Amino acid sequence: MSNDTRMHSESAKGEDAIVDQNRLFSAMGSRRSRLALAYLHEHDDQLSLADLADEVAVAEHDRSVADVPAEAVKRVHVSLYHNEVPKLRNLGLVAYEQERDLVALSEDGADATSLLIELDLL
């Protein structure tokens, strides 16, 4: 492999890493994404999207689920379904089984979440 080819290959890898970092920072810029990851990490199990929406809404409103307005929970559910979970899935941080409507933290997601917790970002 020539030096020019190697340099181009290394440059392309660096650009891919920057794109991945940008996608990760974009996903982590959303408080809902961070709350969802934290809850999945804390409970280490798969969860229905509806249950995850309940838990994220509880965390956002700092109230019990019974005290969170149904419309607020619905907004969280729609946001998770259309925005947050797809971003996290595309990054490989969660697995989403649409047929059964289940979300689970992936191994990479667990590692990333542990790092965010260690850095006191969650």
Image: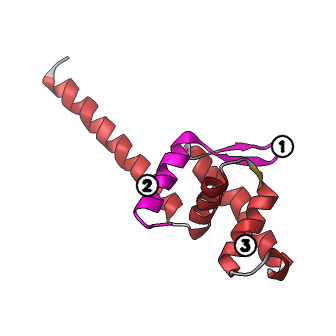
Residue 114 belongs to the span the image colors magenta: yes
Q: Secondary structure at mark 2?
A: helix
* Magenta-span inclusion, residue 57: no
The image shows residue 116 at horizontal and vertical percentages of: 45, 59
Which residue lies under the disc numbered 1? 100
The residue positioned 62% from the left and 67% from the top of the image is 32
| Residue nearest the observer in this picture, 42 or 101 | 42
Q: Give residue 101's position: percent from left, percent from top.
A: 81, 48
Q: Do callouts 2 and 1 mark residues in contact (Cβ within 8 Å)? A: no
Type of amino acid at the residue the image marks with label 2: Leu
Residue located at (74% from left, 81% from top):
63
Disc 2: CA contacts within 10 A as few (<14), some (14-19) or many (>=20): few
Q: Which residue lies under the disc numbered 3?
A: 57
- Which portion, as a residue range, is magenta? 95-122
Q: Earlier in the sequence, mark 3 or mark 2?
A: 3
According to the picture, the residue beneath numbered tag 2 turns out to be: 115
Label 2 or label 1, whichever lies nearer to me, is 2
Determine the secondary structure under disc 3.
Answer: helix
Classify mark 1: residues with Cα within 10 Å, few (<14), some (14-19) or many (20+).
few
